[in-house]
């Protein structure tokens, strides 16, 4: 039995799936994505920061009430903040909308390059890889976006994800007329 298909190309149990979102056939999927992605990031930073700030305030007040003993919890605040951010991104991107709260506000959605919705591990890895690449390659992470048709950033290429306009991909159905 041969692994050669009708085209004569060798395949191993299936072909590689093509890109689901072509920027030349559907440019409306990527129109304004880069700008809205920046605002979505800022909204997500507010959503992540509010519970962290409240946690620090609680620890400070708890330390006052316990005459300084509660301030020992400050060593837990930073690791808890990192875990909170990873869980936030993982749960939001792994949810039914495949988008964080900021992305939903800006009408964006994260998909895999072949069109599948996001999942928890992809969302958590996306966040971790973004922060790692920004820490080491700060301007280069963002500068990759304007030079490709899908407006993908460096960590999107590594993970095989694409951010698209949600309303273009899934238009809202019109209500039935009652007259």
Image: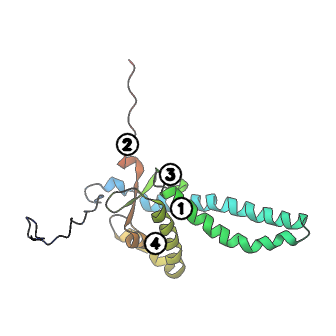
- Mark 4: few/some/many CA within 10 Å (<14, 14-19, 20+): some
Q: Quadrant of the N terminus?
A: bottom left
Residue matched to label 2: 171
Identify the mark at residue 104; answer none if there is no mark: 3
SS of the residue at dot 3? helix
Residue at the extreme top: 179
| Residue 44, horizontal then vertical, whole percent | 57, 59
Mark 1 → mark 4, Cα distance in angstroms: 19 Å
Marks 1 & 3, CB-CB < 8 Å contact: no
Q: Earlier in the sequence, mark 2 or mark 1?
A: 1
Q: Is residue 162 left or right of residue 121?
A: left
Say which residue appears at 38% left-offset and 62% top-offset.
Answer: 162
Mark 4 → mark 2, Cα distance in angstroms: 29 Å
| Residue 20, horizontal then vertical, whole percent | 29, 58
Mark 1 → mark 3, Cα distance in angstroms: 13 Å
Mark 2 → mark 1, Cα distance in angstroms: 25 Å
Image depth: mark 4 or mark 2 in front: 2
Say which residue appears at 40% left-offset and 47% top-offset.
Answer: 167
Mark 3 → mark 2, Cα distance in angstroms: 14 Å
Identify the mark at residue 35; answer none if there is no mark: none
Q: Quadrant of residue 98?
A: bottom left
Q: Is residue 102 above or below residue 170?
A: below
Q: Earlier in the sequence, mark 1 or mark 3?
A: 1
Identify the mark at residue 142; answer none if there is no mark: 4
Q: Quadrant of residue 26?
A: bottom left
Residue matched to label 1: 89
Marks 1 & 4, CB-CB < 8 Å contact: no
Q: Earlier in the sequence, mark 3 or mark 2?
A: 3
Mark 3 → mark 4, Cα distance in angstroms: 21 Å
């Amino acid at each position: 039995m041969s692994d050669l298909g009708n085209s004569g190309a060798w395949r191993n149990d299936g072909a590689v799936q093509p890109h689901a979102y072509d920027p030349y056939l559907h440019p409306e999927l990527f129109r304004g994505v880069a700008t809205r992605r920046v605002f979505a990031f800022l909204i997500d930073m507010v959503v992540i920061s509010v519970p962290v700030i409240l946690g620090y305030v609680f620890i400070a007040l708890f330390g006052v009430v316990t005459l300084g003993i509660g301030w020992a919890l400050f060593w837990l605040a930073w690791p808890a903040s990192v875990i909170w951010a990873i869980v936030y991104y993982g749960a939001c991107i792994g949810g039914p909308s495949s988008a964080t709260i900021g992305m939903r506000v800006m009408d964006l959605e994260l998909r895999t390059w072949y069109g599948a919705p996001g999942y928890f591990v992809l969302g958590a890895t996306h966040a971790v890889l973004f922060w790692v690449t920004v820490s080491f390659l700060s301007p280069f992470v963002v500068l990759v976006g304007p030079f490709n048709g899908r407006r993908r950033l460096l960590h999107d290429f590594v993970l095989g994800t694409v951010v698209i306009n949600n309303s273009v991909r899934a238009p809202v159905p019109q209500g039935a007329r009652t007259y």
